[in-house]
């Protein structure tokens, strides 16, 4: 990273306290932790904006096995690999994704609409 810029922000004191606790447990200062969190936020935000070729990992806690199987079939052109697991009562699927960001966003949106919990982590843009 380049030179630093200082700016003041006001956040809920309970959040500030949690932030301090995390920074302490990670043995880094608060600024470093906030910088890391904001970097992740910018990365995620830039994924949701412009169109690009996107690589990332999608984690799905599916409401139903058949749902996740159907999506894997329908989106196989952007799903490089996947792992479909049953852990206790949960159906958890992780997918490595590579393809047009519009299609990645469509997959994310449609899976979420089924009631599944979906988290997408962009890796490269
Ligand atoms: Zn992306
Ligand atoms: Zn399953």
Image (cartoon, helix red, strand yellow):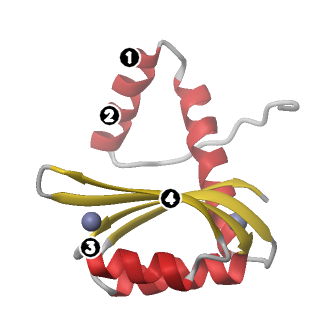
Residue denoted by label 4: 82
Task: From the image, tell me which residue sits under label 1.
Answer: 25
Q: Return the residue at label 2.
A: 18
In the picture, the disc for residue 65 is 3
Q: Alpha carbon of mark 4 to alpha carbon of mark 3: how far? A: 14 Å
Contact check, label 4 and label 2, Cβ < 8 Å: no
The residue drawn where x is 41% and y is 83% is 70
For discs 4 and 1, the disc positioned in front in the rendered view: 4
Instruction: Give the mark nearest the N terminus, 4 or 3.
Output: 3
Q: Nearer the viewer, mark 3 or mark 2?
A: 3
The answer to whether residue 46 is seen in the rendering is no
Mark 1 closeness class: few <14, some 14–19, many ≥20 residues within 10 Å: few
Q: Residue at x 45, y 87 (%)?
A: 110
Coordinates of residue 94 in the picture (x, y in percent)? 45, 56
Q: Position of residue 22 (x, y in %)?
A: 38, 26
Which label lies toward us, 3 or 1? 3
Query: Dot 3: what SS?
Result: helix
Question: Dividing the image into 4 quarters, which one contains the N terminus?
Answer: top right
Is 125 situated above or below 103?
above
Task: Determine the quadrant in which ligand 1 lies.
Answer: bottom right
Label 4 or label 2, whichever comes before in sequence order = 2
Q: How many marks?
A: 4
Contact (Cβ within 8 Å) of mark 3 with mark 1: no
Q: Residues within 10 Å of mark 3 (few under 14, many from 20)?
A: some
**Residue 5, labelled with which disc?**
none
């Amino acid at each position: 990273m380049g030179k630093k810029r200082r700016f003041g922000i006001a956040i809920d004191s309970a959040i500030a306290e949690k932030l301090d606790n995390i920074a302490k447990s990670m043995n880094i200062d608060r600024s470093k932790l906030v910088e890391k969190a904001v970097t992740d936020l910018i990365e995620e935000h830039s994924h949701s904006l412009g169109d690009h070729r996107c690589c990332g990992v999608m984690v799905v806690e599916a409401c139903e096995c058949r749902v996740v199987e159907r999506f894997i079939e329908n989106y196989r052109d952007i799903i490089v690999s996947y792992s479909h697991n049953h852990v206790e009562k949960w159906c958890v699927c992780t997918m490595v994704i590579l393809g047009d960001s519009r299609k990645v966003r469509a997959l994310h949106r449609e899976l979420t609409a089924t009631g599944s919990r979906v988290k997408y982590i962009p890796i490269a843009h």
